[in-house]
Amino acid sequence: MSEIPPSDALRVGQTIPLLRIFDVAKAREFYLDFLGFRVDWEHRFDPTAPVYMQVSRDACVLHLTEHHGDCTPGSTVFVRVTGLERFHVEISAREIATCGRASRRRRGAPA
């Protein structure tokens, strides 16, 4: 087996998770209005077809899909962030029907 030059070595770039959505209006309310993402692009094969869209906030890019075969509902995605306390203050001022107000409860703390 020959040596592989460093310039030909595998380099992993950006990862973009796909998240299953069931209601475009609620997804927009949550990702855009509540979390502060923006729509980069949106695609439908025709006006009645399921939507496939890309949303982003800073360097975080997500694909949201109504297509039933694209991914599994209920998946988990971990996103590394800085400024979480400030973000919490930002979203605590918002209230949307999809998820209510942001909670001050820490993960794992009793309700």
Image (cartoon, rainbow, N blue to C red):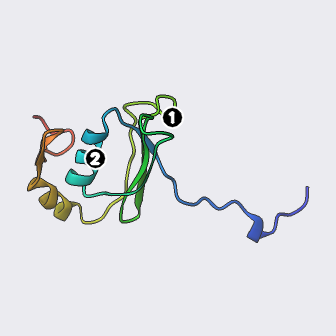
Q: Which mark is residue 109?
A: none
> In this figure, which residue is indicated by the disc labeled 1?
70
Q: Quadrant of the N terminus?
A: bottom right
Secondary-structure class at tag 1? loop
Residues at circles 2 and 1 in contact by the CB criterion of under 8 Å: no
From what the image shows, is residue 80 above or below residue 75?
Answer: below
From what the image shows, is residue 16 above or below residue 68?
Answer: below
Mark 2 or 1, closer to the camera: 2
Residue type, mark 1 in image: Asp
Label 1: how many Cα within 10 Å (few below 14, some 14–19, many 20+): few
From what the image shows, is residue 1 above or below residue 3?
Answer: above
Residue pictured at 45% horizontal, 35% vertical: 49
Q: Is residue 92 left or right of residue 46?
A: left
Residue type, mark 2 in image: Arg
Position of residue 64 measured from the top left corner of the image (x, y, whole percent): 41, 44
Label 2: how many Cα within 10 Å (few below 14, some 14–19, many 20+): some
Residue pictured at 18% horizontal, 38% vertical: 98
> In this figure, which residue is indicated by the disc labeled 2?
28
In front of the other: 23 or 76: 23
